[in-house]
Amino acid sequence: MLYLAELSKPIGFAKSSLQLLAKQQPDNTWVAVNEEAITLEGRIAQEANRFKDGSLVLAEISGSRQVSRIGEAARQLVTYLQNFSRVQDKARSQEEEIEVWKQSLTFQAQELTRREMELEGREEEVQRLYEQYKGVEEERKLLDSLRQELETQQAYLAEQQRLIGQQREALYQQRQELEAQLQEARSSRLREEEAAQLQALIQQLQERLQPAQGVFAPLQGLKSQIQQRQEHLNQSIATLEQERQQAKTEQDRLDQDYRLWKERCAAWWGSRQSWEQAQANWQAQQGSLRAYQEHLQQVVQQLQLQETLYQQTYRLVEEYDFITASGTEPGEAGSPDSVISLEELANLVSQLRRDYEQRSAQVNQQRAELEQSRQALRELQERLATASPEERFDIEMDIDYAQAACGALEEALLPQEKNLQRDYEELIRQEARLSQLQGQSTAALPTVEIGPLLSQIDRQKQALGQEQARLHTLIQQLESSLKAQQENLARQQQELDQQWQQLQAEEESLRACAQAMAETWGRLNHLQASLYLERDLWMELGAQLAQLEADLHQHQQETLTARAHVEQVQSLLVTLAQA
């Protein structure tokens, strides 16, 4: 199991020990431990000599508390901290997304509340329409009953008119008979039997010509009911006109809201296009930044090559007496090394060879670790290609961790390889000197001046250094500008998303209002058609009732005239009878 421990190296002959601080769980998490220190022995103790006292190390410890491997923990801790920082950044971005979703849900909840209130209002309106419908049905039943009663009165009136016509014909015939009898009476006196017969006939006519007083009372009741119904219909029509005017006002407001919504949509699309243009510009600047970074990397590599060339060239001056630079006399560069003895030089070469072999073993071990990390990264990338959506997040986190580990190992390995190369070159140089002192060196060579070459290399280094500083400043400015632009674009995108959600909610609200308005207009038009049709029916019924009342008055007037004529005839008969 892997542990994080603190290395303790006491002064004297005491052995080094590890104080365990934390251990790694199977799920790659770490928990703190409080266990006794483990004493290091053998090969592990020798490996621990590479580290300073108090260093943090990673150790593979078995269940029997045997240390099998020990390594540096600094790079691993840096990797963990980098991964933790990335996780924090992702958590922060997720918190921002959650906050945006909270705001969106709050807005949607408000819209739902508003729509619930609208639905409650529509339910109340439907209830009111149902009550109106029941009232209309009751009024329709009342109208049907009044129409039946009017039809009954019309039938009665027609029967009365028929009887009156018959009576009028009988009266006309009797009048003609009376006139004939009057003509006869003027020429002679009436007999008593004839006078009595005439009186009986006149009495029958008077009884038949009684005015029909009982007919007008039902007609007045019907007329009063029709007038009340017409007044009620007029009030309903006035209320309907008010509702239509209110509906027209609401329709105008809805049309205005729809026009404003379309203008906001057009403005949103304009802002969206501007944001996309800004995003494209930002991506173009990102490409420029990458180009500058690649150029800077090339400049740094060239500068490193120039520095290496300069060092290697100057080392020739130090190693060989026949090579001079800028007026250096032969043998001056190598004069400090010429005072060392053959035995000291041999010991120095042996020490350098041991140091080189030890450092070479460490570098090879780190190379093996780097290759293992790269292999694990390739396996994770292959798993990511076929992973399910639920597994992708964990695999991406592992890939980020593996990439960070590879990067840290590469950064740590590069200077060690350079140091190993310098150690190797120093070993070769000292071995050459040792061979020279042992009598194996060659004869003296003619002097070579390389001062101009070193001056040219130095000038190229200065030019590359200036270019590096310029590129570094430019990259810093671009990174700062791009970071501000990225934050601004993220903020604008968040605002655009919120505005789009609001526009969609407004569109749904406008659709609901338009549907409600269409239902309102349908109801008002249907109600208008029903009320106007009912009003026309009641007006027609009132006109028929007025005509019936006029016919009854005319009939009554004719009856009174006939009675007057009968009374005149009766008076004439009395006069004739007395004569």
Image (cartoon, rainbow, N blue to C red):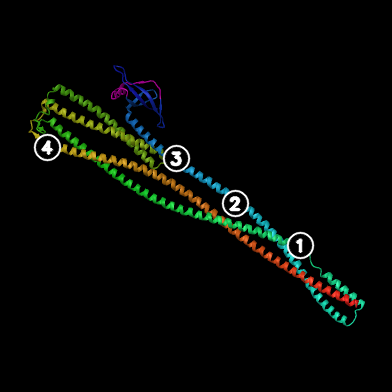
Q: Is residue 14 left or right of residue 177?
A: left
Q: Is residue 524 left or right of residue 94?
A: right
Disc 2 marks which residue? 125
**Residue 376 belongs to the span the image colors magenta:** no
Task: Name the element at disc 4.
Answer: helix
User: Label for residue 217?
Assistant: 1
Q: Is residue 326 left or right of residue 176?
A: left
Q: Which x, y percent locates residue 454?
A: 14, 36
Distance (Cα) linking label 3 and label 1: 80 Å
Disc 3 marks which residue? 99
Q: Earlier in the sequence, mark 2 or mark 3?
A: 3
Q: Is residue 427 above or below residue 174?
A: above
- Which amino acid lies under the numbered mark 4 shown in the image of this protein? Pro
Q: Nearer the viewer, mark 1 or mark 2?
A: 1
- Which amino acid lies under the numbered mark 2 shown in the image of this protein? Glu
Disc 4 marks which residue? 452
Quadrant of the drawing holding the C terminus: bottom right
Quadrant of the drawing holding the N terminus: top left
Q: Is residue 440 visible?
A: yes
Give whichever of 546, 379 is nearer the camera. Answer: 546
| Contact flag, marks 4 and 2 (Cβ < 8 Å) | no
Distance (Cα) linking label 1 and label 2: 42 Å
Distance (Cα) linking label 4 and label 2: 102 Å
Give whichever of 288, 156 is nearer the camera. Answer: 156
Task: Name the element at disc 3.
Answer: helix
**Residue 50 belongs to the span the image colors magenta:** yes
- Mark 3: give few (<14), some (14-19) or many (20+) Cα within 10 Å: few
Q: Which x, y percent locates residue 200?
A: 88, 73
What's drawn in magenta, residue-wise? Answer: 33-54
